[in-house]
């Protein structure tokens, strides 16, 4: 057991310079505060690091390259390798330092002066970028079972001025996976007027894959990342699979030389050795089901179904449960301020030892509550 870290208080009130746009000044910063505790289950990270032997090979390649020279203008070398691995036209692959950068660029591409349509609750970056860039943000509440509100989204697509539509599979922050028919219905309702983004950041854990649906329309895009299933969050790489025509427009917004030689070397090694991704994802799925089974016996904490590498834990009191876990050296993410998620914490699936620590803390919560 460890003492609870001091939680940071509100930042001192500062007045933004007059030249800062109102849309930026009035939006809060990305909602995350790092805490230094032994068990870190708060950021949906891969429970397992990049394999040690591959890390060594990547380091050797980094050291063998000149660092005083610019990298490829548009990451052409690794784009070609990624296109071959995914079976995609290289002209339709766009790479940036993390998929959150692509979300920003997609909002610039199709949201500014137009509409960003998504669900509620949703991934915070969609809404933050929409608000900071002055887009019209429209959110349709999820159904009570966290499934897509198909009728509500179709109605919004029909009545709102076009822009960009975000559909996340598996959904964040719930981990829910929708029926493919429901996703198709919403995507097809968008027609050709909207840019349709299928965010598949956690697809390695769910086994879902919407490349075929994306191929059917030139305005559709699959958004993916190396931060989750690939275990490369520290490298910061994300990518989009789309039509060459949409990729051409999107690349106009991507800064030149945006993938450095160090990240490029690490990704080369990963793409040459992709087998570890499926193995690690299978391990996470097994641990997820083990944790679910154990929490199913808990009298007051209830894990909600998920197909991602995280899940929602519904508690009677999110703050009390959060602080209890912190006192046991475990940090998770509170979600209880979001619509429909009263009492919920979001918990990443950790290693077996980390999950054992969580389950032990869960049992201790019951005992301390008596």
Image (tube, helix red, strand yellow):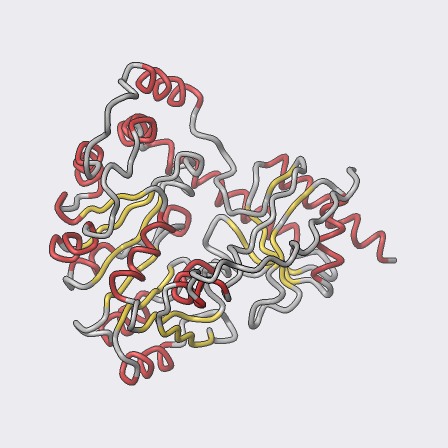
Residue 316 image point, x, y percent: 73, 65
Q: Nearer the viewer, residue 313 or 332?
A: 332
Residue 267 image point, x, y percent: 31, 31
Q: Residue at x 31, y 65 (%)?
A: 180
Res 87 → quadrant: top left
Q: Quadrant of the C terminus?
A: bottom right
Q: Residue at x 74, y 60 (%)?
A: 299
Q: Nearer the viewer, residue 271 or 264?
A: 264
Residue 144 image point, x, y percent: 52, 75
Q: Quadrant of the N terminus?
A: top right
Residue occupying the far right of the picture? 370
Residue 260 image point, x, y percent: 30, 31
Res 245 → quadrant: bottom left
From this view, report whether residue 301 is shown above or below residue 70.
below
Q: Residue at x 50, y 61 (%)?
A: 174
From this view, report whether residue 323 is shown above or below residue 51.
below
For residue 364, side relative to residue 353 (left or right): right
From this view, report whether residue 190 is shown above or below residue 105.
below
For residue 248, side relative to residue 346 (left or right): left
For residue 248, side relative to residue 139 (left or right): left
From this view, report whether residue 186 is shown above or below residue 289.
below
**How many marks overall?**
0
């Amino acid at each position: 057991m460890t003492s609870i870290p001091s939680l940071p208080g509100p930042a001192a009130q500062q007045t933004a310079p007059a030249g800062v746009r109102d849309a930026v000044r009035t939006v809060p910063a990305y909602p995350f505060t790092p805490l230094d505790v032994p068990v870190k289950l708060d950021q949906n990270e891969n429970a397992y690091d990049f394999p040690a032997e591959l890390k060594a090979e990547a380091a050797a390649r980094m050291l063998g390259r000149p660092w005083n020279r610019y990298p490829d203008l548009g990451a052409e070398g690794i784009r070609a390798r990624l296109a071959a691995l995914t079976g995609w036209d290289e002209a339709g692959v766009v790479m940036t330092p993390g998929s959150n950068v692509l979300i920003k660029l997609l909002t610039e591409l199709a949201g500014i002066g137009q509409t960003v349509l998504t669900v509620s609750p949703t991934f915070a970056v969609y809404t933050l970028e929409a608000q900071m860039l002055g887009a019209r943000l429209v959110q349709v509440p999820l159904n009570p079972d966290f499934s897509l509100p198909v009728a509500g989204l179709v109605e919004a697509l029909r009545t709102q001025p076009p822009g960009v539509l975000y559909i996340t599979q598996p959904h964040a922050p719930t981990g829910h996976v929708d029926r493919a028919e429901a996703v198709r219905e919403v995507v097809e309702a968008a027609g050709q007027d909207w840019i349709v983004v299928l965010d598949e950041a956690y697809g390695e854990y769910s086994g879902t894959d919407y490349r075929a649906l994306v191929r059917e329309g030139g305005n559709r895009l699959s958004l993916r990342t190396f931060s989750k299933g690939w275990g490369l969050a520290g490298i910061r790489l994300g990518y989009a699979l789309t039509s060459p025509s949409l990729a051409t427009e999107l690349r106009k917004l991507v800064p030149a030389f945006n993938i450095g030689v160090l990240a490029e070397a690490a990704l080369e090694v990963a793409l040459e050795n992709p087998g570890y991704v499926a193995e690690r994802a299978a391990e996470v799925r097994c641990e997820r089901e083990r944790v679910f089974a154990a929490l199913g016996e808990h009298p007051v904490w209830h894990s909600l179904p998920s197909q991602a590498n995280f899940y929602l834990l519904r508690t009677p009191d999110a703050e009390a449960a959060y602080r209890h876990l912190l006192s046991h050296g475990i940090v998770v993410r509170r979600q209880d301020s979001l619509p429909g998620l009263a009492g919920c914490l979001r918990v990443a699936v950790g290693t077996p030892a980390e999950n054992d620590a969580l389950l032990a803390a869960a049992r201790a919560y019951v005992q301390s509550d008596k």
